[in-house]
Amino acid sequence: MAEAYIYDCVRTPRGKGRPDGALHEVPPIRLASHVLTRLKERNKLSTDQVDDIVFGVVEPVGE
């Protein structure tokens, strides 16, 4: 069995999942980049130490 390590978790800001919601102009990739940057900083990780990253979405826009 392969080994897995969970270092930390970070969430993005919450907003209403509507086209006119507070975060409707923020691209998902920008939110994701902030999450990854914070995880890297908080855990002093080098990107060559990371093999996989798992993201989850709870409520996509419009639902």
Image (cartoon, grey):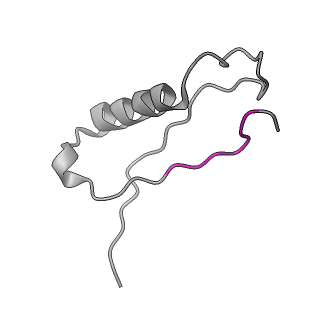
Q: Name the spot of residue 37 as percent of width and height, x first.
A: 34, 30
Q: Quick check: is 1 in the magenta stretch? A: no
Q: Is residue 16 left or right of residue 39?
A: right
In this orientation, which residue lies closer to the viewer: 39 or 61? 61
Residue that appears at 61% across and 15% down: 25
Find the magenta span and give its range.
55-61
Judge left or right: residue 56 versus residue 53.
right
Q: Choose top left, top right, bottom left or bottom right for residue 36.
A: top left
Tally of numbered discs: 0
Nearer to us in this view, 40 or 30: 30
Residue 7 lies, in percent from the top left, at 37, 51
Q: In front: 43, or 61?
A: 61
Residue 52 vertical placement versus 3 (above, below) = above
Q: Residue at x 36, y 37 (%)?
A: 39
Q: Which part of the image, by quadrant, shows the C terminus? A: top right
| Residue at (32% x, 74% y) in the render | 3
